Amino acid sequence: MSKKMEISEKDPTTEEKIKEAARKVFHKKGYAGTRTRDIAEEAGVNLALLNYYFRSKEKLFDLIMEETMQLFFQSMKGLINNERTTLQEKLQDFTTQYIDFLCSQPELPIFILNEIQMNPKGLSERMGLQQVVIGAYILKQFREDLGNKDIPDSVLLQMIVNIIGMMVFPFIGKPLLKEIFNLSDEQFQSMMNDRKKLVPLWIESMFSAPINPKDFSMIQNIKL
Amino acid sequence: MSKKMEISEKDPTTEEKIKEAARKVFHKKGYAGTRTRDIAEEAGVNLALLNYYFRSKEKLFDLIMEETMQLFFQSMKGLINNERTTLQEKLQDFTTQYIDFLCSQPELPIFILNEIQMNPKGLSERMGLQQVVIGAYILKQFREDLGNKDIPDSVLLQMIVNIIGMMVFPFIGKPLLKEIFNLSDEQFQSMMNDRKKLVPLWIESMFSAPINPKDFSMIQNIKL
DNA sequence: GTCTATATTTAGATAGAC
DNA sequence: GTCTATCTAAATATAGAC
């Protein structure tokens, strides 16, 4: 194999090694719980190089956080905006692929939601968060499909929370789940695999639940 | 009003003030993100008094963590072990009262689940966690009710995750939800109020979803 | 670009007066 | 019990040689 061919697969640069290590450690321990020494050690480089390449812990974190949020939300964006699939197909694609994605990055949910709570400022401006969800093509389809059933937007909002929650929450509660039910990693994995098909089934049946509008405040003035 | 009568309602002691402040700050910022100075300031006492009363930040945290876990799980324990109500009644009581509880302490879920992930060791021994859930009376009732429908324990486990998740997840995602959907605190509150009745309805309908066992691995060897 | 050594800053903890 | 002042340790950041 020639040297030229190896360029594309050559060893990562020091800068890349640091970024990868930072991603790993920040995701696991959060901003406050991470020491720059941990990152340097994980990357196998000298501590001083962190500041040489990224100026400060905070700047490095901001970079990682930005990329992580992109990853987390953009991976969702593509799945819910496919205009060539039916609602049922899209829901199935979404749960399958997003659960696969989360399985490959199981600490993402708690990292992101925790850091957002610590520092919510300038969240949605940084990326078009509102547009990602509210403008999603799948929402249009939901509304068409449900228009017949007289289901208000406030219930649709509740269902969005449920769909996301049923995929994301198990990862947030994973350490607790594993202890309470003595689950192995394999069992957790197969539980999430089952969810790929269960979530769409559940969602469909939940929409059939007999809702009496008089029982609910229906969150005034919600429109998606 | 006599001085004797005022004893029971007198100002909190310094020790109590510190503990309350510690609870508040730890819940908000987590262990790593909290500085002892924050706690002292919140309590309005001198920094040195923290160590006078509690020896160290870590000891103070352990104390708060212990009490918080008790609060979080014990408040659940009573609700799912009432032997005098039907399954439907108990589910309704559970969702109503547990959501009320979470509304009164909205940072609890993310605090607890985050700290558990950071340091899962000795979790379930510290309190009889397995017994709280697995030994719950409501589980017996679920099994009886579902015995007729041939629903395996692995699906019951999935449903437990759903029940807890539908109550807890909105609080974990609250900052994000509020930004994406422009929710006010009042709207979030009324959303959670609606959930008190929606969750039991949803759960019931989800149990009616048509499940084909061939589609699922059904998590081998799970028994609750 | 990388390293050693060191400076700076921050946070937890304590000594000792009152 | 409480406070001031201070110590110590830890963590971030930088200077300067190579």
Image (cartoon, coloured by chain):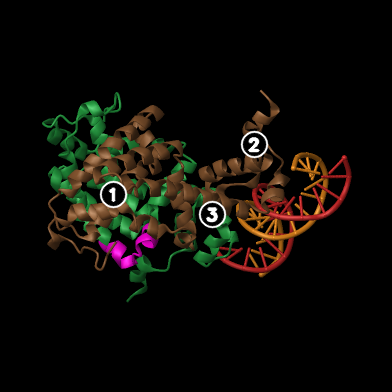
Chain colours: A green, B brown, C red, D orange
Magenta stretch, main secondary structure, is helix
Crowding at mark 3 (Cα within 10 Å: few <14, some 14-19, many 20+): some
Of tags 1 and 2, the one toward the viewer is 2
Residue of label 1: B162
Q: Chain of mark 3?
A: A
- Determine the residue positioned at 52% across, 42% down: B28
Label 3 sits on a secondary structure element that is helix
Question: Spatial distance from mark 1 to mark 2, Cα to Cα?
Answer: 40 Å
Identify the mark nearer the N-term, 1 or 2.
Answer: 2
Question: Spatial distance from mark 2 to mark 3, Cα to Cα?
Answer: 32 Å
Q: Along the horizontal axis of the image, is A126 left or right of A162?
A: right
Q: Quadrant of the N terminus of chain B?
A: top right
Whether the magenta-drawn stretch holds residue A184 is answered as yes
Discs 1, 2 touching: Cβ within 8 Å: no
**Amino acid identity at mark 3:** Gly
Q: Quadrant of the C terminus of chain B?
A: bottom left
Q: Position of residue B121 (x, y in %)?
A: 48, 63
Of tags 3 and 1, the one toward the viewer is 1
Label 2 sits on a secondary structure element that is loop
**Amino acid identity at mark 2:** Pro
Q: Report the label total.
A: 3
Camera sees residue A84? no
Camera sees residue A69? yes
**Amino acid identity at mark 1:** Asn
Of tags 2 and 3, the one toward the viewer is 2
| Residue A69, placed above or below residue A186 | above
Read off the magenta span.
Answer: A177-190
Residue A33's disc number: 3
